[in-house]
Amino acid sequence: MALSEQFLQEDLHPIDIVEYIAEHHDWEFDRVADDQIAMAVEAQWRTYSITLAWSAYDETLRLICTFEMEPPEERLPALYETLNAVNDQCWAGAFTYWAEQKMMVYRYGLVLAGGQVASPEQIDTMINAAVMSAERYYPALQLVVWGNRTPKDAIQVAIAEAYGRA
């Protein structure tokens, strides 16, 4: 059954839909407020903290996907150069580094102006795209920060396609 079939006759708050999706995937979550939910999504490289918040003021569903990263100070210029290259490849959302919190952040905003309603499939895709992007670029970021690789070399890890199965 498609995710949206549960909501055909209902006009639900976007965070209610996110809560349903989190339950559907069996993700740990906490409904922080009526307009905000936080969850943990386990993937191959790590567990990502994902927060979605609804802003009625600008009719936007905001997603923030974070993971800890504590790069040495001398590697920050290379990290920022890598983030620029990564963001050139991201069609939806963007990465940034919050130095004070020591967090890598992927952000995306789904604008639902004019009373539009996001479907469960849209929200699920938004969450999965955040995790997939974090997973795709995590090795490259690690190589730049801890492997002393150049951003150009490290980004090749993320853009190289794997063929076949091991």
Image: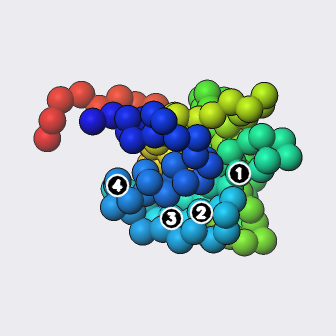
Q: Left or right: 70 with respect to 55?
A: left
> In this rendering, which labeled residue sits more in front, label 3 or label 2?
2
Instruction: Give the residue type at disc 4.
Output: His
Lower position in the chain sequence, tag 3 or tag 4:
4
* Label placed on residue 54: 1
Q: Nearer the viewer, residue 145 or 127?
A: 127
How far apart are the alpha carbons under marks 4 and 2? Answer: 15 Å
Above/below status of 106 relative to 50: above
- The residue sitting at 39% across, 41% down in the picture is 6
What label does residue 39 carry, if any?
A: 3
Q: Are circles 1 and 3 on residues that touch, CB within 8 Å?
A: no
Residue 121: quadrant of the picture: top left
Q: Earlier in the sequence, mark 4 or mark 2?
A: 4
For the point 56% across and 59% down, the residue is 50
- Residue that carries the numbered disc 4 in the rendered image: 25
- Residue 7 at x, y = what percent? 46, 40
Query: What whole-number distance in Å separates the C-alpha atoms at marks 3 and 2?
Result: 7 Å
Under circle 4, the secondary element is helix
Which circle, 1 or 3, is nearer the viewer? 1
| Residue ID for mark 2 | 37
| Residue 153 visible | no
Which is more toward the observer, 128 or 71?
A: 128
